[in-house]
Image (cartoon, grey):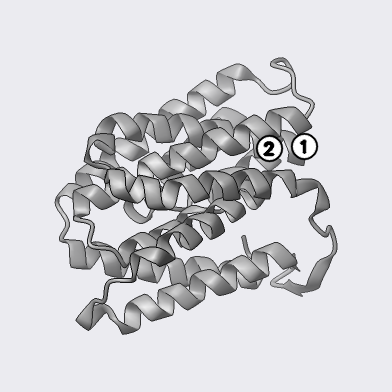
Amino acid sequence: MEYIVVGIVACLGSLLSFMSGFGMGTLLLPAFLLFFSPELAVLGTALVHMANNVFKLFLVGKYASKEMILRFGLTSVLGAWLGAQCIAFIPKTALWSYSLWGYFFEVKTVSFVFGALVMFFAIYELQQEAKKSIWPVHWLPWGGLLSGFFGGLSGHQGALRSAFLLRTALTKNEFMGTRVVLACMVDITRISVYFSIVQWAPQTMQSGLLIFASFAAFGGAYFGMRWMQKSESSFINRFIAVAMLLFGLCMMIGWI
């Protein structure tokens, strides 16, 4: 059963993440939580996420902007390391909780703050779409630090990264390639820290399940790339902005 659930979620999550730059980790983590402890679920999600990003690196990595990698990526690595180190200090209590339709939901501090930031950038993007503005380059290192920090802390990094990169002069292909390279940099950083703080053995989590989930994610990434290549940049930007808006709202109300 775990192969079916995790495989389907990995494929759909990868498809979504290729189109928007985020979403795979958010969807895959709950699937792993059905079968493993929270610590192992976080690590397993990060490993599949990394494998998928490496696969996407071969697909579109050649288009990455070296300038953006230097300006955005170096501080992303620093932010990811700081965020991963802070995992042990995250408040375990929820801001508030509620029941809806027979389900129990909790709104945690990190999710609420991250969701609010994502919604802010999404609303800004939708309002300014008609007359697109380019953000000053000196904002990029701060964007890298912020997105990297949340990537290391909770695994949520892509939404903020997309928000900043959308406001640059990158072409569609450069946007896809740069996004993937930056994601790999953050994943390598946070996984190295996770291994140092999580007790994990190969027999604890089935290696076959991780491999199966990775290949399912590869399929989603391949079809996502083909969809992106056929789409106009303006449509992609609006799609990402709407996805960010829904993503941020769901995080603020504790649905993800």
User: Where is 177 relative to 55, above or below?
Assistant: below
- The residue beneath circle 2 is 41
- The residue beneath circle 1 is 37
Horizontally, is 181 left or right of 249 in the view?
left
What residue type is disc 1 on?
Answer: Ser
User: Where is 217 relative to 160, above or below?
Assistant: above
- The span from disc 2 to disc 1 (Cα, nearest Å) is 6 Å
Q: Position of residue 146 (x, y in %)?
A: 55, 60
Horizontally, is 131 left or right of 84 in the view?
left
Q: Quadrant of residue 249?
A: bottom right
Quadrant showing the C terminus: bottom right
Q: Residue at x 57, y 18 (%)?
A: 208
Q: Quadrant of residue 93?
A: bottom right
In this view of the protein, which residue sits in the foreground, 77 or 105?
A: 77
Q: Position of residue 204 (x, y in %)?
A: 74, 21
Q: Residue at x 42, y 80 (%)?
A: 123
Horizontally, is 143 left or right of 82 in the view?
left
Q: Position of residue 226 (x, y in %)?
A: 20, 43
In this view of the protein, which residue sits in the foreground, 26 or 34?
A: 26
What residue type is disc 2 on?
Answer: Ala
Dot 1: element = loop
